[in-house]
Amino acid sequence: WEQKLKELPEAVQKIFPFLYVPKASKSERNEGLSNETIQRNIHPTVKPIKLMSYLITLTTREGDVVLDPFIGSGTTAISALLLNRQFIGFEREPEYFKIAEERIAYYQAQKKLGD
């Protein structure tokens, strides 16, 4: 384990086991929202994709299913998708659901282009 720690970037080694991730940028928050009805992400607590990807990587393997009972604007689902996991998400707020739907569709299309 100590050898693996030495392989991490020096900045990460200094704060290990913690991970510092700044809040999601405006461009990340709004990526994929091109529809005339949804032009910006209004969700109050959009998580960074990097953070959710880190947490998913810690707790799952490729092909596993990630359950997000409060999907919000879809960041956890996007991270799961990018990491080759399946996902199930629930959202009771229709406006957040629409945002998540568009963001997820955008990243699904991007992933297919990269395949």
Image: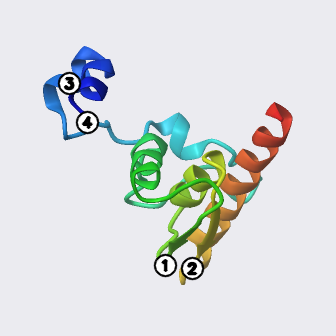
Q: Secondary structure at mark 4?
A: loop
**Amino acid at pointer 3:** Gln
Label whose residue precedes the other's in the sequence (2 or 3): 3
For label 4, the crowd category at 10 Å Cα-Cα, with few meaning under 14, some 14 to 19 and many 20 or more, is few
Side of 58 where 83 appears, left or right: right
Residue at mark 3 = 13
Residue, far left: 14
**Could you tell me if the residues under marks 4 and 1 are in contact, i.e. CB atoms within 8 Å?**
no
Label 2 and label 1: CA atoms lie apart by: 5 Å
The residue labelled by disc 4 is: 20
Q: CA distance from mark 4 to mark 3?
A: 12 Å
Disc 2 to disc 1: CB gap under 8 Å: yes
Looking at the rendered structure, the kind of residue marked 1 is Pro
Query: What residue is shown with label 2?
Result: 90
- The residues tagged by marks 2 and 3 sit, at their Cα atoms, a distance apart of 36 Å
Closer to the N terminus: mark 4 or mark 3? Answer: 3
Q: Residue at x 44, y 51 (%)?
A: 52
> Going from the N terminus, do you reach mark 2 or mark 4 first?
4
